Image: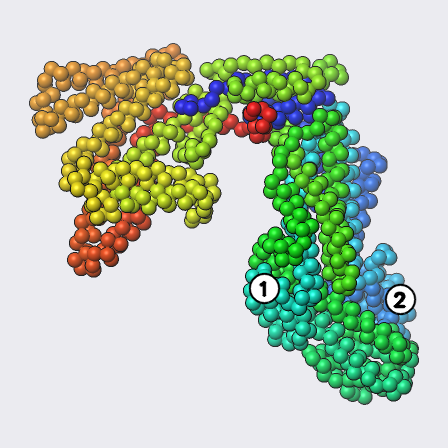
């Protein structure tokens, strides 16, 4: 189609309670362009507006700004304000606790040690202000306490105190003098990671509560009209954003599937003793790594460090190296315990308790010195085993808690305590064996997962190796849920209620995904005999989650369209309580009845519906349906602008002229064939060459294909094929027929410029400017001036540029037409200035006259470059022939062809584009149209 598709303008009005039904009807048609009919305004502070519209989530909420906004819009005694202030105060307390935990971690102290006594030392924590900081530190240091400080707010510091038990009374006295009240929650006294996790949970909960409170504040402040309007917007927006967030769970679910596959592979690998991985074509070094774990070979520190240099493990290196060290410790503990059991228990049961420990070589310092006697411990078994050092000791029952803790903290040892009884020791041996196997399975699974993800191993291939059809079904469900979703319309029930229920269902699925992640990670730590049963349970949960995601994401397309369209709907109040939602926009004429039908079937009550033809004075959007090859070629037009509704779409004309001019300048059968092959490759693969987009790659491929065909045609005319000239008699030789090729180029330029002015006449007639089409410098008068000028130049050329030919009667007539056309253009400008009272019209006429006198001849001569590049191309063949005498024929022709393909092919494209855009399109194409932006995609029902 030469011009944009005909449109009709429509207006629709419905009762506001059917707004969602209206949106559903509009999005079901899809090819609808909506116009904004009124400017959105709100009396609410911007932050509350953003909260209502979902632009601010609990995670992005600025807590301090929320408090400031609440204090500005609420009374001091308002219960909502008091609740917000309480939440913000608790949030600030959590921030202080986070800083305290971070500072404790830096100095190597755990929150669970606060207030406790260990080995005669007490650990305590107080809060002091800036005013008391230096006095407090000096006072505590003077009595012999160790002090560490950290800032926790603008004016407060946390002081960590470590002191001997006999200093407790003095410390308590100083605390009364300097310490501020500090109420630590009961959950604070735990391991750092647990405390930080609890702080994160509490912070998120506070943010959610503040977010809900702000929504409530906004709802209180709005009147009923604004409330209902924003509520509908909120439900649609929240449902759409929830689906977008749900789509982001694709990676999390893929991670779960990889973990599942890794656990299955680890189990199978252990069972088949390392015969599975090679079938997945995993690199040999990773297979050897898994084999080493299976065979429980000792990993030296050097080999562990080598892992960090392997690309898959660089991110998760610490976790995997810790697991390897732990496996080494279990293997060493088992070895030394088995050796000890070869003795009789009566030989070493000096005390009631037995400690089995295994760590690095530093443990040797304890086990081979007199230090053991200080603790009342006795040696049972010791020695270097594998990676580190093992030590079994008999200790008094009174040291059952403190002594193992010393081994763990000071010597980083793996420690187990049991009664000195043969049965208990054998039970411990069995327990260690199970734990070792669990660690081994977990380690192999981690290695496999990291490797599979890094090398992007296809999960379908993994399922095939596992022989697990159910897992293959999960992989297919995952692909279907996220990549092959079939869009569906909203159900015909109450759509507003459906969207609310959809939000709740999505939240439930998100929670299920989090639960599945936690469960699958927990399975990593389980013994091998229970792994398969746990995985079977997870399989059922995953199947249910993926089926629900596939169903929910099928509404994403329609909700996206509704989300885009909803802000363009307007609402008016009739009398006091009656509210009406109305919208106006444009639709292609051929889909008008489809819209009428969808509105009638989906909206229970239509108050108003009218379709009108687009008036000539109206600036309507341009609906240009680009299918097939044209969707790539339209980029030639869009780079210059969007055709207006009344303007010709020049895509086909641009493409045709570009292709012809390219072939004329780059005529060669062989190189044209290569160019066409390159274009077909780019068109098919959309390869992002030199970083261009896939859409740009498609456009490049389409143009290169057509340019290659044109080059082959002109190459046949010129007798060129890779400069070898296989054609006996060329129709036209650029370098031997210089005048002929220049004449062809000039006449082509003349025809092209005349075509441009004819197209401008057509455009002006479409716009309803009949006078402009006849009397403007780019219209009828321009055509008269240019064609007369060309005829005069042709007469001069025939007479060898003898200017006496200008005196002939026929040339005199042509000169009169040239002068007349200039006078008419200027007179028309004066007429428009008088009738429209716009002086710009006269200036425009003057600029047209100047362009006719200067630009028209310059534009015509510009087309000589077509001949120049054609001659330059043939000159390369002469270069190749001359070089052949020096470097040989093959090398000469290869160099010449590579130079031409690498440099001239690009230069010719630039020149063809320049002639198309500057000399041609500026005569008729403004490109100031409005792009037709459909709110959705054409549904199958409507297209049928």
Q: Looking at the rendering, in which quadrant would you find the C terminus?
A: top right
Q: Which one is in front, 75 or 574? A: 574
Q: Secondary structure at mark 2?
A: helix
Residue sitting at x 39%, y 30%: 651
Q: Which mark is residue 37?
A: none
Residue sitting at x 24%, y 25%: 853
Q: Position of residue 515 (x, y in %)?
A: 76, 50
Q: Position of residue 212 (x, y in %)?
A: 77, 38
- Reading the image, the residue beneath label 1 is 278
Q: In this rendering, is residue 98 above or below 46?
A: below
Q: Position of residue 830 (x, y in %)?
A: 32, 14
Q: Quadrant of residue 581?
A: top right
Mark 2 to mark 1 CA distance (whole Å): 67 Å
Q: In this rendering, is residue 576 above or below 689?
A: above
User: Is residue 252 in sight in this rendering?
Assistant: no
Q: Position of residue 305 (x, y in %)?
A: 61, 71
Q: In this rendering, is residue 772 above or below 410?
A: above
Q: Is residue 480 left or right of residue 779?
A: right
Q: Which mark is residue 172?
A: 2
User: Is residue 551 in sight in this rendering?
Assistant: yes
Q: Secondary structure at mark 1?
A: helix
The residue mark sitting in front, 2 or 1, is: 1
Q: Is residue 813 left or right of residue 135?
A: left
Residue sitting at x 43%, y 20%: 646
First in sequence: mark 2 vs mark 1: 2
Q: Quadrant of residue 937?
A: top right
Residue sitting at x 76%, y 34%: 501
Classify mark 1: residues with Cα within 10 Å, few (<14), some (14-19) or many (20+).
few
Q: Which one is in front, 695 or 789? A: 695
Q: In this rendering, is residue 855 above or below 302?
A: above
Q: Is residue 290 left or right of residue 395?
A: left
């Amino acid at each position: 189609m030469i011009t944009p598709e005909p449109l009709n303008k429509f207006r629709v009005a419905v009762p506001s309670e059917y707004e969602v039904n209206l949106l559903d009807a509009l999005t079901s048609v899809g090819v609808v362009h909506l116009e904004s009919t009124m400017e959105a305004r709100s009396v609410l502070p911007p932050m509350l507006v953003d909260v209502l519209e979902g632009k601010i989530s609990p995670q992005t909420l600025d807590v301090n700004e929320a408090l400031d906004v609440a204090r500005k819009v609420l009374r001091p005694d308002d219960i909502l304000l008091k609740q917000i202030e309480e939440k913000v105060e608790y949030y600030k307390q959590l921030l202080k606790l986070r800083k305290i935990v971070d500072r404790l971690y830096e100095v190597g102290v755990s929150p669970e040690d606060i207030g406790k006594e260990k080995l005669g030392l007490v650990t305590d924590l107080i809060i002091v202000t800036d005013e008391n900081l230096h006095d407090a530190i000096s006072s505590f240091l003077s009595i012999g306490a160790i002090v560490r400080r950290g800032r926790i707010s603008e004016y407060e510091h946390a002081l960590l105190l470590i002191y001997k038990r006999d200093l407790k009374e003095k410390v308590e006295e100083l605390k009364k003098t300097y310490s501020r009240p500090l109420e630590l929650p009961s959950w604070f006294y735990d391991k750092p990671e647990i405390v930080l996790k609890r702080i994160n949970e509490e912070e998120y909960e506070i943010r959610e509560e503040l977010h809900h409170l702000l929504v409530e504040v906004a709802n209180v402040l709005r009147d009923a009209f604004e409330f209902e309007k924003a509520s509908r917007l909120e439900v649609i927006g929240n449902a759409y954003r929830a689906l977008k967030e749900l789509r982001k769970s694709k990676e999390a679910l893929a991670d779960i599937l990889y973990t599942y596959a890794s656990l299955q592979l680890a189990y199978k690998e252990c069972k088949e003793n390392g015969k599975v991985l090679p079938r997945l074509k995993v690199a040999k070094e990773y297979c050897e790594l898994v084999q080493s774990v299976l065979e429980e070979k000792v990993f030296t520190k050097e080999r562990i460090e080598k892992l960090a240099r392997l690309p898959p493990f660089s991110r998760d290196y610490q976790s995997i190296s810790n697991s390897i060290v732990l496996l080494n410790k279990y293997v060493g503990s088992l070895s030394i315990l088995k050796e000890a059991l070869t003795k009789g228990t009566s030989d070493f049961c000096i005390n009631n308790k037995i400690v089995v420990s295994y760590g690095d070589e530093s443990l040797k310092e304890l086990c081979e010195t007199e230090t053991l006697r200080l603790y009342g411990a006795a040696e049972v078994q010791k020695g270097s085993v594998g990676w580190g050092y093992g030590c079994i000791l008999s200790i008094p029952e009174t040291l059952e808690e403190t002594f193992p803790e010393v081994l763990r903290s000071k010597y980083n040892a793996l420690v187990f305590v049991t009664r000195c009884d043969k049965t208990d020791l054998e039970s411990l041996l069995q327990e260690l064996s199970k734990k070792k196997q669990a660690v081994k399975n977990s380690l192999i699974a981690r290695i496999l997962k990291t490797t599979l993800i890094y090398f992007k191993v296809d999960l379908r291939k993994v399922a095939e190796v596992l022989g697990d059809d159910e897992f293959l079904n999960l992989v297919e469900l995952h692909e279907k849920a996220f990549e092959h979703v079939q869009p569906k319309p909203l159900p015909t029930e109450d759509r507003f209620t459906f969207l609310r229920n959809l939000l709740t269902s999505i939240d439930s699925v998100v929670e299920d995904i989090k639960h599945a992640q936690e469960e699958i990670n927990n399975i990593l730590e389980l013994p091998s005999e229970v792994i398969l049963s746990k995985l079977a349970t997870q399989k059922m949960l995953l199947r249910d989650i993926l089926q629900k995601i596939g169903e929910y994401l099928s509404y994403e397309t329609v909700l996206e369209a509704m989300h885009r369209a909803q802000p363009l709907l307007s609402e008016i109040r009739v009398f006091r309580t009656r509210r009406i939602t109305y919208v106006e926009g444009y639709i292609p004429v051929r889909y008008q009845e489809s819209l009428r039908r969808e509105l009638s079937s989906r909206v229970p009550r239509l108050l108003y519906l009218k379709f009108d033809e687009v008036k000539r004075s109206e600036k309507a959007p341009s609906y240009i349906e680009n299918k097939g090859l044209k969707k790539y070629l339209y980029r030639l037009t869009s780079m210059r602008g969007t055709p207006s509704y009344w303007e010709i779409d020049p895509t086909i004309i641009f493409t045709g002229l570009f292709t012809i001019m390219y072939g004329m300048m780059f005529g060669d059968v062989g190189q044209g064939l290569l160019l066409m092959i390159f274009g077909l490759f780019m068109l098919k693969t959309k390869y992002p060459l030199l970083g261009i987009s896939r859409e740009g790659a498609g456009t490049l491929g389409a143009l290169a294909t057509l340019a290659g065909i044109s080059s082959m045609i002109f190459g046949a005319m010129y007798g060129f094929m890779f400069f070898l000239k296989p054609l006996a008699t060329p129709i036209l030789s650029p370098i031997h027929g210089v005048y002929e090729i220049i004449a062809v180029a000039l006449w082509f330029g003349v025809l092209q410029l005349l075509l441009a002015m004819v197209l401008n006449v057509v455009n002006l007639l479409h716009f309803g400017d009949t006078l402009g089409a006849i009397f403007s410098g780019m219209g009828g008068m321009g055509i008269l001036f240019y064609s007369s000028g060309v005829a005069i130049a042709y007469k001069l050329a025939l007479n060898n540029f003898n200017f006496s030919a200008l005196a002939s009667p026929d040339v005199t007539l042509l000169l009169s037409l040239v002068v007349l056309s200039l006078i008419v253009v200027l007179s028309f400008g004066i007429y428009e200035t008088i009738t429209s009272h716009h002086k710009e019209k006269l200036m425009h006429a003057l600029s047209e006259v100047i362009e006719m006198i200067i630009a028209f001849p310059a534009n015509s001569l510009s087309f000589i470059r077509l001949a120049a590049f054609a001659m330059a191309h043939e000159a390369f063949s002469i270069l190749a022939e001359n070089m052949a005498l020096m470097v040989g024929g093959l090398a000469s022709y290869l160099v010449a062809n590579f130079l031409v393909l690498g440099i001239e092919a690009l230069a010719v494209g630039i020149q063809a584009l320049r002639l198309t855009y500057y000399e041609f399109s500026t005569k008729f194409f403004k490109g100031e149209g409005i792009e037709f932006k459909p709110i959705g995609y054409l549904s199958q029902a409507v297209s049928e």
